[in-house]
Image: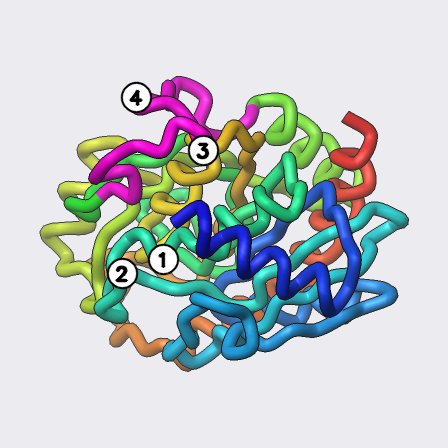
Amino acid sequence: MYEKLGKAAQYIQSVKITKPKIGIVLGSGLGVFIEQIEDKTIIAYNDIPFFKKTTVEGHEGRLILGKVKGVEVAVLQGRLHAYEGLPMEEVVFPVRLLAILGVSKLILTNAAGGINLNYRPGNLVIIKDHINFMGKNPLIGPNNNEMGPRFPDMTHAYNPEMNSIMKEVSNELGYSIHEGVYAGVLGPTYETPSEIKMLRILGGDMVGMSTVPEAIAAKHLGLKVCGISCITNMGAGIIDQTLKHEDIKHEAMKAMNHFTALLNNSIEKFGKI
C-alpha cells in the first residue's frame, strides 16, 4: 500500500509540484465548488496510478490542485464507495494520497438524508461525530506503523477547533447551521422507514453511504478532520416521498451559495491554524 501511494504521489508531483495544506472531498452534487479554486491543475483519476474510476453519477472523478483564498488545496471531485464493490483499502486510497502529498487538514463533504426532525432539505450540518453502521472498517488487516497506530483514538474524530471555526464563519455569513451525528451505512439501497427510526433512536441526525471510512483513515494518519453534510432529503417515512439520486443532486445545488461561502471562508481560517 505505502509503495502504491508513493508512486501515485510521484506521478502527481510530476504533473504539478505541490504541497497542499488542506484536502477537500466533494460529495454528490457538490462539485460546483471547484469554480472557487484558482490556479487550477486538473488530473483525471484514470491517469493516477492505482486510482479507481468513480462509477456514480455526480462524482466526476478528478483531482484538482490549486488555491482557495491563497491557501494551497487538493480537492477530490467525486469519491469512491464500498457499495460500488470496492474493498475499503481502495475506497480510502485517495484520502491517504492527500496525506502523502502533505495535507494536514481534511474537509469531508456529503449529501445526506435527514433523520433529525428539525432538519429540512437544503440545510447544512457540521458533523460532530459519526456512527459506523457499514459493518466495515478501512483499518482491518495488518497495520502499517508508518501510517498510524494499530488502535487509533476516535474520541475527537472530527476536530473541535475546525468545527468551531465553521460555526463562527456560518454565523458571520448570516446563515444558520446545525451540528449533528452522521450515521454511515453501506448502501446502495436507501434506508427503510424502520431503519431511519432505529438510527434516530441510536443517536443519528443524518445518514449517508460515505465519509466514515475516509474519516477513520484520515484520523489514523494523524490528519485533523471536519465534515459538512448537505441535507438533500428527509429519511424514509418522515414525509411521503420516493427517493431518487437526481433529486438529491438538485437539492444539493440549492445549498451551493451557503456551501461555497462556508468552505471559502473556513479554508482561509484553517490555513492560519
Q: CA distance from mark 1 to mark 4?
A: 20 Å
First along the sequence among labels 3 and 1: 1
* Labelled pair 1, 2 in contact (Cβ < 8 Å): yes
Q: Which residue is mark 4?
A: 151
Q: Which residue is mark 1?
A: 91
Q: Which residue is mark 3?
A: 147
First along the sequence among labels 2 and 4: 2
From the viewer's perspective, tell me whether residue 20 is left or right of residue 7: right
Q: CA distance from mark 4 to mark 3?
A: 12 Å
* Labelled pair 2, 3 in contact (Cβ < 8 Å): no
Q: CA distance from mark 2 to mark 3?
A: 21 Å
Q: Which residue is mark 2?
A: 82
Magenta segment boundaries in residue numbering: 137-159
Which quarter of the figure has residue 87?
Answer: bottom left
Expressed as whole percent of the image width and height from the top left, the position of residue 29 reads 53, 71
From the viewer's perspective, tell me whether residue 168 is left or right of residue 27: right
